[in-house]
Every structure is written in C-alpha cells, then in structure tokens.
C-alpha cells in the first residue's frame, strides 16, 4: 500500500534547495521540522509554528538532539499569523492538519484559522515553490477542513498555481494530501 508520508516527501524534494526558506505550519512532534532543516542545510532557514507549548518543547528537544544545523526558528503562535514572522519567499511549506499525535485530541487545527493560514502560505510561496497540505478526514473537523480546502484549491487560477490531490479513493477516511505548486 502507498506510504503517503514517504510520497509527500518525494513530491516536495524537487522544490527544496540548499539555502532555501521553508515553513512547517504545524510543528507537532517536529518530524517535518527536522526533515526540512536537513533539506535546506546550514545556509537555509526553517520556521515552524504550533499553538501548543508542549509541541514546541518536544520539537525543541528533538531538534537539539538530532538536527545537524541550527537553522530553525520555533514559534509558539498560530500559523495564520505566519506573515508576521516569515519575511522571505518560501520554497516549501507543509501543513499536517489535525491534532498532536500523543497529545490532546481536543486541540486540533480548525477551519477558521486553517483557511487564512493556507491563504497566507500561498502568498509567501516563491516562484516554483510548493505547499503540501495533508488532511485527516477521519474526524469531523478534518472532513470539513478537507471540503473547505477543496473549494479553495479548485478556485486558484491555473496560470499561477497547479494543484494536485493524492487520495486513496477506496478508503474515504484515510489521510490525503494536496500539492500546490506555484508556477514561474
Ligand atoms: C498532525 S499534528 C502535526 C504533526 C507534525 N507535522 C509532526 O511532524 O509531528 C498537527 C499540529 O497542529 C497544531 N495546530 C493546531 N492548530 C494550530 C494553529 N492554529 N497554528 C499552528 N499549529 C496548530 C496542533 O497543536 C498539532 O500539534
């Protein structure tokens, strides 16, 4: 069976470059933050956001132990305020929506902040940059986030963006993702 997490990375790799700026919009346990930090290298920068101090603390510990470079900034704030912190165009942004694995399932990403955060991420994208948005429709808010994002992405102008969706069609509750590429 397709490994979606692995596939996500394969789609993002062509957009990542040494020295680039990347954003993990949902830091969680820091898996994506660490991976992005490795990809952009010593001269790059990764900004990572989470509203839960617990997620930021877990990620800080993990990065201290495993990250090869001190090229990251961990921010305890909502991702819809990303433009207050990120001032350079980004080559890659990742949203892994939902709740913190091993944390409080009551604290999840919500449509009211996910929508402005994704819209902000689109404006931050550099030409040829890419955004990966993983949706978890197995819970109600996740399902509704998916519907809202489908509407947003379907309306993006083709001249500026190409949007693909990878979904296991015979497993409707299974996570799926969108890849949004900004054209030149
Ligand atoms: C599925 S987890 C992310 C997993 C993470 N990428 C990893 O590698 O472990 C989703 C995270 O989004 C965070 N979150 C929820 N609302 C948020 C918001 N408005 N801004 C930033 N992060 C948010 C949650 O606290 C949770 O840690």
Image (tube, rainbow, N blue to C red):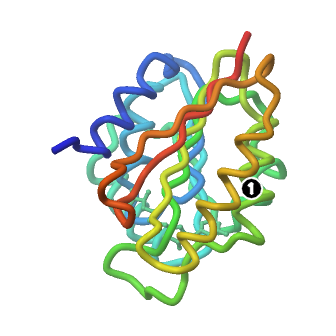
Question: On the rendered structure, is 118 left or right of 55?
Answer: right
Could you say which quadrant of the image residue 6 lies in? top left
Q: How crowded is mark 1: few (under 14 residues within 10 Å), some or many (20 or more)?
A: many
* Residue at 55% across, 19% down: 19
Q: What element carries label 1?
A: helix
Q: Nearer the viewer, residue 5 or 139?
A: 139
Question: On the rendered structure, is 108 left or right of 148?
Answer: left
Could you say which quadrant of the image residue 174 lies in? bottom left
Q: Residue furthest left?
A: 1
Q: Nearer the viewer, residue 40 or 172?
A: 172
Q: Which residue lies furthest to the front in this view?
A: 170
* Residue at 54% across, 84% down: 107
* Residue at 33% across, 48% down: 168
Above or below 116: residue 110 = below
The residue that mark 1 highlights is: 117
Quarter of the figure that contains the C terminus: top right
* Residue at 23% across, 44% down: 3
The spot of residue 77 in percent (x, y) is: 69, 68
Determine if the C-beta at disc 1 is less than 8 A from ligand 1: yes
Quarter of the figure that contains the N terminus: top left
Above or below 91: residue 105 = below
The spot of residue 176 in percent (x, y) is: 43, 51
Q: Which of 179 and 9 is in front in this view?
A: 179
The spot of residue 21 in percent (x, y) is: 61, 30
Above or below 17: residue 125 = below
The mark total stands at 1
Above or below 43: residue 134 = below
């Amino acid at each position: 069976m397709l490994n979606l997490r692995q596939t996500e990375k394969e789609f993002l790799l062509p957009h990542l470059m040494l020295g680039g700026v990347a954003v993990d919009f949902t830091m969680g346990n820091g898996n994506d933050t660490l991976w992005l930090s490795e990809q952009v290298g010593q001269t790059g920068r990764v900004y990572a956001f989470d509203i839960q101090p617990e997620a930021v603390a877990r990620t800080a510990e993990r990065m201290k132990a495993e990250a090869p470079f001190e090229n990251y900034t961990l921010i305890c704030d909502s991702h819809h305020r990303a433009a207050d912190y990120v001032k350079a165009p980004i080559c890659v942004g990742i949203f892994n929506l939902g709740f913190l694995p091993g944390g409080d399932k009551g604290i999840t990403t919500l449509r009211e902040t996910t929508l402005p955060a994704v819209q902000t991420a689109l404006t931050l994208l550099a030409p040829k940059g890419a955004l990966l948005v993983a949706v978890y429709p197995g819970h109600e808010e996740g399902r509704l986030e998916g519907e809202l994002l489908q509407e947003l992405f379907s309306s993006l102008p083709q001249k500026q963006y190409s949007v693909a969706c990878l979904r296991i069609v015979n497993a409707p509750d299974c996570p799926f993702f969108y890849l949004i590429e900004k054209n030149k």
